[in-house]
Image (tube, grey):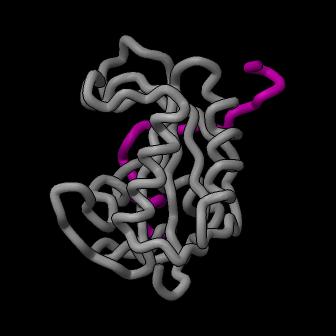
């Protein structure tokens, strides 16, 4: 473990009670070793990026303060996905899933390995990332792309809306 740093994590789910998967993930992220959950966004609903023959997604973003290195953090995120039933090997790219956890931004780190690219390569283009991220850190700079506020204002992906749990289960 190293010095504490900020990590922004994107969460998504569209199978088997997605809101429950996200709530459980909030709790599990807060319990990671050497990590504190500082804030979580509201939950948003969006159309899937991949095949439209799947349910809408629920998405959120959390900000963590962590002592975990990026690849250590990624390992914990993948373990949490697996605990909630995700089976990466059998999934379609952009297909349905019970839980997807992505490191969006890890401090000001830029890296590219076979396992992890930081910042997340699609974060600066996706409304389902930028809207909840803007709730938590509108002035956050996504390295190489600009501030979350500016990126959200120019985002061209389909609009998203706040998820109303009382109306949707």
Residue 158 in magenta stretch? yes
- Whether residue 143 is visible to the viewer of this picture, yes or no, is yes
In the rendered view, tell whether residue 121 sits above or below residue 88: below
Locate residue 5, reporting x and y percent.
Answer: 52, 81
Q: Nearer the viewer, residue 3 or 56?
A: 3
Q: Residue at x 53, y 20 (%)?
A: 15
Residue range corresponding to the magenta coloring: 149-169
In the rendered view, tell whether residue 76 sits above or below residue 70: above
Instruction: Determine which quarter of the picture holds residue 69.
Output: bottom left
Locate residue 167, reporting x and y percent.
Answer: 79, 21
Q: Tally the numbered discs.
A: 0
- Whether residue 57 is visible to the viewer of this picture, yes or no, is no
Residue 90 relative to residue 138: left or right: left
Instruction: Determine which quarter of the picture holds residue 31.
Output: bottom right
Of the 4 image quadrants, the one containing the C terminus is top right
Q: Nearer the viewer, residue 34 or 92?
A: 34
Locate residue 134, reporting x and y percent.
Answer: 57, 63
Residue 143 relative to residue 164: left or right: left
Q: Residue at x 37, y 27 (%)?
A: 87
Q: Residue at x 61, y 39 (%)?
A: 44
Locate residue 151, reporting x and y percent.
Answer: 41, 64
State the residue lying farthest toward the right.
Answer: 166
Residue 153 in magenta stretch? yes
State the residue lying farthest toward the top.
Answer: 53
Q: Nearer the viewer, residue 123 or 118?
A: 118
Q: Residue at x 75, y 31 (%)?
A: 164
């Amino acid at each position: 473990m190293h010095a504490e740093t900020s990590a922004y994590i994107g969460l998504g789910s569209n199978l088997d009670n997605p809101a429950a998967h996200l709530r459980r993930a909030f709790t599990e992220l807060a319990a990671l070793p050497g990590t504190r959950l500082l804030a979580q966004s509201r939950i948003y609903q969006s159309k899937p990026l991949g095949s439209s023959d799947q349910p809408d997604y629920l998405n959120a973003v959390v900000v963590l303060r962590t002592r975990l290195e990026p690849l250590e953090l990624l390992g914990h995120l993948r373990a949490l996905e697996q605990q909630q039933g995700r089976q990466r090997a059998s999934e379609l790219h952009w297909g349905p899933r019970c839980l997807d956890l992505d490191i969006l931004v890890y401090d000001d780190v830029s890296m590219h390995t076979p396992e992890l690219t930081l910042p997340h390569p699609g974060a600066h283009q996706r409304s389902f990332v930028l809207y909840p991220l803007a709730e938590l850190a509108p002035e956050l700079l996504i390295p190489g792309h600009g501030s979350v506020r500016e990126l959200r204002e120019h985002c061209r992906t389909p609009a998203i809306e706040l998820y109303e749990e009382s109306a949707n289960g």
